[in-house]
Image: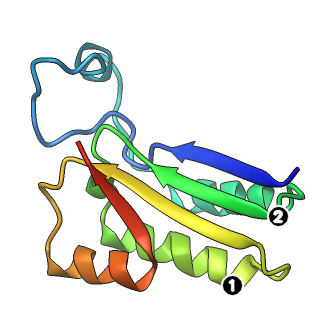
Amino acid sequence: MSHLSLLIKPAAGLCNIRCAYCFYRDLSESRVNKIMTRETADKLIERALDSGAENITFAFQGGEPTLAGLDFFEHFTDSVNKKNNKKIKINYAVQTNGMNINQDFADFFKKNKLHKRKI
């Protein structure tokens, strides 16, 4: 396997705006919204790194993924860096409405080469 691409919902259906066109809004209102635990993130990372892929894309979406908090993303990228012993090429992407992007998030995105895609 040369490339593995994972679509990750770290904040489940949580969102900080109410778009009238959102197809997921009705579904997310009827479910318990939870933030992904560090344990789950670590298991996901380990399995991805053990997949045999030559490069991996971790893409975050939601709801609104930034509602998981900057500490979630810092832990995630730190874990990938520590566990990536095979030096697999890692790509990150985040689909965000941009409402939570402050200077700290912007600095983090730049440092970790996260490409944000505003919707």
Tag 2 residue: 54
Tell me: 112 left or right of 62: right
Residue type, mark 2 in image? Glu
Rendered position, 70 above or below 97: below
Decide which of tag 2 and tag 1 comes sooner along the chain: 2
**Residue 74: percent from the left, percent from the top?**
44, 77
Determine whether label 2 and label 1 are within 8 Å by CB: no
If the image is split into quadrants, where does the C terminus sit?
A: top left
**Residue 53: percent from the left, percent from the top?**
83, 58
Q: Quadrant of residue 105?
A: bottom left
Residue drawn at the location 24% of the way across and 14% of the way down: 26
Rendered position, 82 above or below 114: below
Tell me: 71 left or right of 93: left
Number of numbered discs: 2
Query: What secondary structure is found at the residue carrying circle 2?
Result: loop
As drawn, the label of residue 82 is 1
2 or 1: mark nearer the eye: 2
Residue drawn at the location 33% of the way across and 59% of the way down: 116
**Residue 13: percent from the left, percent from the top?**
33, 33
**Residue 62: percent from the left, percent from the top?**
35, 40
Residue drawn at the location 65% of the way across and 48% of the way down: 5
Q: Nearer the viewer, residue 118 or 31?
A: 118
Tell me: 22 left or right of 88: left
Q: Quadrant of residue 88?
A: bottom right
Query: What secondary structure is found at the residue carrying circle 1?
Result: helix
Residue drawn at the location 73% of the way across and 50% of the way down: 4
Tell me: 79 left or right of 37: right
Rendered position, 103 above or below 1: below
